[in-house]
Amino acid sequence: EGEVIAKYLPAQLTADEIKAIIAEAIASTGAAGPADMGKVMGAIKPKIAGKADGALVSSLVKESLNLGFAGLVACRLTGLRHAVSSVP
């Protein structure tokens, strides 16, 4: 019975496909950190509806935003260190 029903359900997106959709949404919304999760989820919801597990999507969005935020902080700290180290 489950096999018959599965034939009529939309194909599930892979983790890589979901990550690509998330990356596109982050870029298009200008999301910069965890506080922007709602923006990203709102942008991707129509693209993933019925095609991906919500818990998986949520965790991937959180991961992407935390990595992006950490990378931004690291870049700013590196720039600050460089600026401070170049002062005579």
Image (spheres, rainbow, N blue to C red):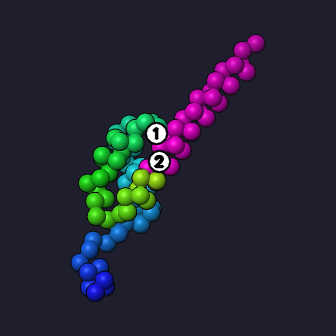
Please give the name of the residue rendered at 26% of the width and 81% of the height, measured from the top-left corner.
5
Q: Nearer the viewer, residue 88 or 41?
A: 41
**On residue 23, which mark appears?**
none
Alpha carbons under labels 2 and 1: distance apart? 7 Å
Q: Is residue 44 above or below residue 49?
A: above
Amino acid, disc 2: Lys
Point out residue 50 in the picture as x, y percentages from the top left corner. 28, 64
Residue ranking furthest to the top: 88
What is the x, y in percent for residue 48?
Answer: 31, 59
The numbered mark at residue 34 is 1
The reply to whether residue 78 is in sight is yes
Residue stretch in magenta: 61-88
Give the farthest residue toward the front: 1
Q: Is residue 45 left or right of residue 19?
A: left
Return the x and y of residue 27 as percentages of the image width and height.
39, 42
Please name the residue shown 46% across and 39% down the image: 34
Quickly name the residue at label 2. 62
Left or right: residue 38 compared with residue 15 = left
Label 1 element class: helix
Which is nearer the eye, 73 or 55? 55
